[in-house]
Image (cartoon, rainbow, N blue to C red):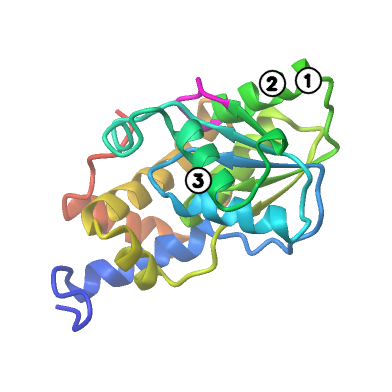
Amino acid sequence: MSADRPGLPDDVLADAQILWDYHQLHHELRPTDVGIGLGSHDPGVADHTADLYHRGMFPLVVFTGANAPTTVGLFPDGEAVHYARRATELGVPADAILIEPRATNTAENLTFARQLLDEQGITPQSVTLITRPYQQRRAYATCRKQWPDVDVICSSRLQSFRDYLHAIADDDRVINMLVGDTQRIRLYAERGFSISQPVPRQVQDAYNRLVHRGYSSRLSR
């Protein structure tokens, strides 16, 4: 067992770390036309979006997301609504926020956010996608497929995997989500929802071991 995470075996932590590292893209921040906060169980997305807004990285925010099985208990009013509420608490002006409350997956996040911007007469040339740390690669791959003409970068709150586990305080949820996102990299490309991404052998092996250990509740059937 790990000394600082007594509930998790060291080999599980090591494999989850491999997946965590794979999903982060380390894009260099630069100003874009719009920041799009993708709904999830992670309230840090709203906090990071507000921080980037205050740093002048974009003048307009779209929060997008309804609910998923992992968030309905956390955010009963919907992910986007909760995120917008949190961002205004952190000083983002309400008139700098658009709310898209219908999306239930990443492709819908991007499609519906784009439609909402179109309805407002806004055609961004560049966007920053703000996600939970291990959603970056999937969000990027989905955006390149669903919105190919926009310049996209991804950003998440900077923190270590172990710090993230402490912050979320639900190890099983995080590791199951990591495994689910890893499956969707290949699966969603095959289904035409996203562009293909390389999956190194060590990532596939770590994924397989975690599935074998029972971290399969977020797999798409």
For residue 162, side relative to residue 134 (left or right): left
In this orientation, does residue 77 appear? yes
Badge 1 marks a residue whose secondary structure is loop
What residue span does the magenta drawing correspond to?
100-106
Please name which of the two marks, 3 or 1, marks the residue nearer to the observer. 3
Q: Position of residue 52 (x, y in %)?
A: 68, 57
Q: Position of residue 123 (x, y in %)?
A: 84, 28
Q: Position of residue 109 (x, y in %)?
A: 57, 29
Q: Amino acid at mark 1?
A: Gln
Q: Which residue is mark 1?
A: 120
Residue located 51% across and 39% down the image: 85
For residue 192, side relative to residue 180 (left or right): right
Q: Residue furthest top?
A: 119
The numbered disc on residue 86 is 3
The numbered disc on residue 116 is 2
Q: Quadrant of residue 121?
A: top right
Badge 3 marks a residue whose secondary structure is helix
The numbered disc on residue 156 is none
Label 3: how many residues lie within 10 Å, few (<14), some (14-19) or many (20+)? some
Q: Nearer the viewer, residue 133 or 52?
A: 52
Please name which of the two marks, 2 or 3, marks the residue nearer to the observer. 3
Label 2: how many residues lie within 10 Å, few (<14), some (14-19) or many (20+)? some
Inter-mark Cα distance, 2 to 1: 6 Å
Label 1: how many residues lie within 10 Å, few (<14), some (14-19) or many (20+)? few
Callouts 2 and 1 close, C-beta under 8 Å:
yes
Mark 3 or mark 1, earlier in chain:
3
